[in-house]
Amino acid sequence: MNNPSKVPVTILTGFLGSGKTTLLNRILSEEHGKRIAVIENEYGEVGIDQALVINADEEIFEMSNGCICCTVRGDLIRVLGNLMKRRDKFDYILLETTGLADPGPVAQTFFMDDEIASEFSLDGIVTLVDAHHINQQLGRSQESTEQIAFADVILLNKTDLVQAEELDALETRLREMNRLARVHRCERANVAIPTVLNLEAFNLDQVLANHPTFLEPEYPFEWTGIYELEPGRYKLSLDDGPDPTMSLVMVERLDPNEEALQQGAEWSVRRYAEPAFKISPNNIVPMDQHVELQLQLSGQKSFAIEIERQTSLALFAQHTAEEFNLRLSASDNAEVLPVLERTWVAQHEHDDEVGSVAIEADGDVNANKLNVWLGKLLREKGVDIFRMKGFISIAGESQRFVFQGVHMLFDGQPERPWGDDPRHNQLVFIGRNLDGDTMKREFEACLN
Amino acid sequence: MPKLSKNKSHGVLQNGFFATVNDYPIAGGWGLKGKFFAVGDASGSIHAFDGTSGQEVWKNPQAHLGGILSMSASSNGKQLASVGQDGQLALWDFADGQMQHRTEIASGWVEHVAWSKSSNHLAVSSGRVLTILSSSGEKIWSSGNHPSTVSALGWVTDQEISTACYGRVTFFNSSSGQENERLEWQGSLVSLALSPDGNVVACGSQDKSVHFWRRSNGQDSMMSGYPWKPSELAFSHDGLLLATGGGEDVTIWSFDENGPEGTTPGVLEFHKAPISSLAFSPYQRHLASGCREGGVVVWSVGKKGSVRGLGGAPLDGAVENVYWRPDGRSLAAIDSEGGITVWRVKKI
């Protein structure tokens, strides 16, 4: 499985105009020490320099048995078969597909063709999304939906062209469609290279190391505001709202940018899992802790925040600022406005056909029952399941069982021992018209 | 400079010479009735060696920009045709390496080239198009677009050429370009071999099967169960045997009597890595097989597919292909490490 001499291949998908060529050029200029070959299925918006660029005409090869998971891309087999013979000249391959390409056959080529599988490893699927146009595209084309569904990383590009609220809603929509993917916001595809290369997203040995949990967290907070503050004492005031309490985590020195915000959010998710300190009005709110503001009294409530050094302060709040009319003011009562706001609340305004089914359960599963269930699921719904990943606690086995798959192609192996960790199961399926409730029920029936 | 190999060969294979080229050898061919052996590599250069001593006799370092994709030696041994990633076909005088002709075939890769049996015509394919040229490199006709990229070429007779692509094998009149016949199969055909009498056409398919058709009666059959796709196919000189790769074993189907339908194939179990090359000797039912982890074996195969090992030799690299000298008295192998190994084959 894990042959270090295999050449990694990253698939870049996305509609024309989503910024694939910009990202390609960015990778090529920053990774100039590496020898990268680029396989293109369409002529890019701008030229690509400093790399061997090979054009391939998309040729989809369906097999006589009609099985969708046997469908491969003949053009890639030929081009990669040739590159293989000179692979000492390449460290990495970037494969750019057209906006109209179905990512399934592209990915399957790396598993179904033995020669390709023995020389190349599919590293990950990166989907670029034009934040300005994706909503229309998702409504119109099956291809753009599938490109989201197959992605390991979704780059929400051209964020400068879209309002913040629209961006939040869009990100929520994409996350609901594909809960396995990491979503990064960017302008002009300006992401750090490690967010798109060497993901090892299909390597079962790495899957758990890279993602201790497969699921992107469902944030326990709905709103974040980042404030630039001078030293001093500040007042956090809230009016009456929908709940008698509100959880909050405050983090200092969190720069108002996307990357820091994501890190802060993940850090805060863990604080939220800890027991909350109850804080009554007029008391000081401590930093870096899960607190529960007591809001039972009617009328405006105030809490104190003490800042010793100039800082940027992030509030990860259980409810949106709007719901409680949350405001921050300085000692002279002047209101301080956040320099960056983010709403994390799930907005179920799109009823996408493609979505994620996440199953989480404690305990051990019966291996036989699981086999029967998975076999039936893949037989009946394999065509509609684009990606799946997970780990399972099998009764009587000391190690976690990890798996991943594309359509009906299923790949699983035992991974590290459970040791003292609580035994549980996490399975994520991304597909079209999946019946999550039935799948959960059927999985639970496999539990001992 | 050629140097002698330290590899030990056994049985009928006797050390001839070992030479190297600087890049991955893609294709080879014997010329001048076995006097020279030429190799084209991934860097685009062609080297010709004396077939006995291994001395380099000529080279063309920039034959094809971007790399060689295929070569074919004319059956009269006088000319070598090469095609490459530069979209060109080049014709070389095998005796001195002088370029006789160069012509642009396409803007993309030209992947296949094959001389007709009489050395009068050349077939080349690039993408979905087949082009037939004269022995001096003049274009005679080009086909329309096939439904997908042409994956293999095969001359049936001097008057007929066949192509394989996704979904079908197509036969064309080589003078007029008119389509003679079309054999369809929904699958990606990756290789093609024709029996010497032109009756049987066999194709390896991406779905790990070998499909063959008998043109005389329209009967077709599928042989499945290969662990890999059978990219390597070879008919014996008498048309009785079809050797197929598609895994670590070589599977041999016998067309003797009513076979191979309903018969058990001969199986050569020896190689420890997938088969990468197969070639039958021009005059005997002797089969040479090479595999991906280095190693060439010569087998004697009976009419019904029974096998006996005659000799073998290990190689450093994955065997890219094997080529019998036209008289069957020498065997050349090219491997992924740039090695060119030529053995004398003892007569038995």
Image (cartoon, rainbow, N blue to C red):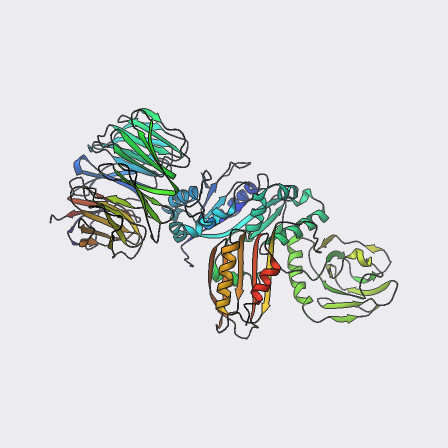
The residue most toward the right is A299
> Which residue lies most toward the left here?
B348
Residue lying at the far bottom of the rendered structure: A420
The answer to whether B99 appears left or right of A314 in the picture is left
Where residue A124 sits: x, y (%)?
51, 52
Residue A349 percent coordinates (x, y): 70, 50
Q: Residue at x 56, y 64 (%)?
A: A443
Q: Quadrant of residue B272?
A: bottom left
Q: What percent of the width, then of the height, locates residue A25?
A: 53, 42
Q: Is residue B230 left or right of residue A354?
A: left
A437 with respect to B313 (left or right): right
Note whether A290 is above or below A20 in the view shown.
below
Q: Position of residue A365 (x, y in %)?
A: 53, 69
Question: In this view of the protein, which residue sits in the foreground, B182 or B319?
Answer: B182
A438 or A171, nearer to the observer = A438
Tell me where residue A238 sits by quadrant.
bottom right
* Quadrant of the snapshot with the N terminus of chain A: bottom left
Quadrant containing the C terminus of chain A is bottom right
Q: For the image shown, how many numbered marks are present on the structure?
A: 0
Q: Is residue A108 left or right of residue A195?
A: left
Q: Is residue A199 visible?
A: no
